Amino acid sequence: MKKFKFCPMCAASLIERTKKRVECSADCGFVNYDNPTPVAAVIVECDGKIVLAHNRSWSNTFYGVITGFVDHGEGPAQCAVREVKEELDLDATPAKLIGVYPFERMNQVIIGYHVEAKGVITLNEELDSFKLVLPEECVVWPSGTGYALRDWLRSRGIEPEMMKPPKK
């Protein structure tokens, strides 16, 4: 991520005070805390199966859960339901919190939810494919959204298989 070089308030140089914080070198009081961005991650259950989707911007064959940035003035549970409608065109039940997970690589806080959804899946422009997977056949991955899926599966009495890291 590119860091600011100049204060957006007074144009003075910025000084790195800690690895994750820069401050104005003048006396205007500006501090860039670089706080993480909140993201809703949604385990979408449709007809007893989990919807996993592939984002068209991903170069690999990875399928993940539905995610979206929480908008200004929006709660993360609202975001979860909105993203299911926007990305899959499904009507979702109210979102139930699974847990909160760090995703340091992207400076995000993942807020995991589960919804049940109905309708015919119609992908929006962000996604290029999806698959429906029985919960007991889900394989989870070692990062924020994967931990949310893992915890939801465990809450259902299913101990999921962990995805193997790619060979180097």
Image: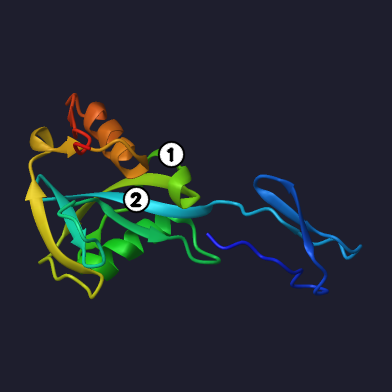
Q: How many marks?
A: 2
- Mark 1, other Cα within 10 Å: few <14 / some 14–19 / many ≥20: some
Give the residue at the far right of this rendering: 27
Per the image, the residue denoted by label 2 is 41
Instruction: Determine whether the residue tagged by mark 2 lies in a helix, strand or loop.
Output: strand
Q: Secondary structure at mark 1?
A: strand
* Amino acid found under the numbered disc labelled 1: Tyr
Q: In the image, residue 150 lies at what x, y percent?
A: 26, 33
Q: Residue at x 25, y 58 (%)?
A: 92
Q: Image quadrant for the C terminus?
A: top left
**Whether residue 159 is situated above or below residue 74 in the rendered picture:** above
Q: Is residue 47 visible?
A: no
Work out whether residue 121 can be spotted. yes
Q: Earlier in the sequence, mark 1 or mark 2?
A: 2
Identity of the amino acid at label 2?
Ala
Residue situated in front as seen by the camera: 151 or 141: 141
Q: Residue at x 23, y 51 (%)?
A: 64
Residue 141 quadrant:
top left
Cα–Cα span, label 1 and label 2: 10 Å
User: What residue is drawn where x is 33% and y is 56%?
Assistant: 67
Q: Do tag 1 and tag 2 residues touch (Cβ < 8 Å)?
A: yes
Which residue is found at the position 7% from the left and 41% from the top?
134
The residue that mark 1 highlights is 101
Give the left or right position of residue 160, taking residue 36 as reference.
left
Q: Residues within 10 Å of mark 2 (few under 14, many from 20)?
A: many
